Amino acid sequence: MGNPSESAHFAFQELVTLAHTDERLHAGERDSLARFARHLGISTTKAARYKKRCHKLSDFPTDPQRQLDLLVMLARVAYSDGVLQDAERRYFERLADEFDIPRTRLAHVLEAAEAKAERQVHLDRRWCGAALALVLVAGLLAWIFRFHAPDDMAGFKALDAELRKTLLLVHTRYTLVSDSAVARRLNATGTAFLTSQDGLAITNKHVVRPWLYSVQAQELLAEGYRLDPDSVECFAWPEGQQVLDAERRPLFERAFSTRKGNLEIIATAPDAEAAMADRPEHLRKPGVFCHAHDNGDLAVLRCAVRGAVVVAPLAETNAPVERLDPVLVLGYPRGLHLLETNFAVSTPAVGRVRKVEATLYVTAPIVGGNSGGPLFDRRGRVIGIATRTFGSATLAGCLRVDHARALLDSQR
């Protein structure tokens, strides 16, 4: 590991200073410092040499975004022991005054760090119970797979080999601009799947219209940023297509794209605004749009495909789905970051249906990048569209395919 950059050295020095503000270094603070050191490129040996030292005002970064990033890092360290000491609170108030950060913004940063710390404490307390539950679930799954896994797995291997050819890796990038701040370039990545020979494909709306859902984008919009509509670009690489060059830069010219005109977003489900009570408190403002997490998180694309293509068959309307039915999820978890070969190579996952409602809840792992991917039954029919998780890789939500079929039929 090489020498850390000047900004990394500065940030870590300030983290160490904060951790020692109350003259004690708790285990949680020590662990947080170790994690930040690793991500800042500072070796364990070098990290141990950093001692408490106060920077002068002239030493602090002048860029507002870097100041805010530093404040967020410091808040996480401060709350890593579960409580914000009086000395630490005075430290933050002093730093906020030096950065000219409003106390309301500081309160939001501290509240977010406190909430994260409380969630961690809650998880720690439930660890023993969760471990026991996992043992019981593992026993149940072992019993189930004893009778069903061989046939299901063999069938899913054959389905994966054929149906992954229907997939598209989708990437959307856009810019938020402000009259008083630097423009912010943001992006989102997900999965789509072909459903017709003329190139119609289904994905999530939050993959192609991410600013309606992204917390980061919503916070910026709440601060006065606005979307630059001319900056919105959507790209889609078919399964097996090279996506990144040797330097791991996206090969946009090889993708279907709205820029070139061979990719269109031809329909999205109607916008539905989230109720004020369902939003984070700092986004409960008139004029700030936050999209509801509903069954309308769907979009239809059209790709200018050439020749015959493999399409994913949709299950019939109201097709029966039962608890513990085996399912297969196809997609690109972690998006561009998990493409070790630089090609669009999908990752399959299998699981069982846990709950059947307007949303299908499954045990198949679904993470960022899977969004918009197909959920197949053992017959290879699409019964759902991967959409969101609920804090656990073994509890994932998929929209019923009936919602997608209605939107798709409106475009035929």
Image (spheres, grey):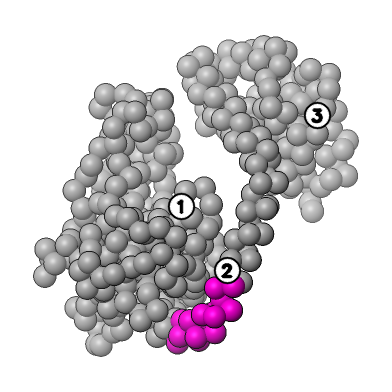
Q: Quadrant of residue 82?
A: top right
The kind of residue on which mark 3 rests is His
Relative height, residue 223 to residue 86 (above, below): below
Query: x, y percentage for residue 55?
Result: 74, 21
For marks 3 and 1, give the one nearer the viewer.
Answer: 1
Magenta-tinted stretch: 143-158
Q: CA distance from mark 3 to mark 2?
A: 40 Å
Give the SS element for disc 2. helix
86 left or right of 255 in image: right
Q: Quadrant of residue 48?
A: top right
Residues at discs 3 and 1 in contact (Cβ within 8 Å): no
Q: Is residue 296 visible?
A: yes
Q: Is residue 98 visible?
A: no
The kind of residue on which mark 2 rests is Leu
For label 1, the residue is 389
Q: Nearer the viewer, residue 263 or 317?
A: 317
Disc on res. 141: 2
The kind of residue on which mark 1 rests is Thr
Question: Where the C terminus falls, by quadrant?
Answer: bottom left
Residue 150 colored in magenta in the image: yes
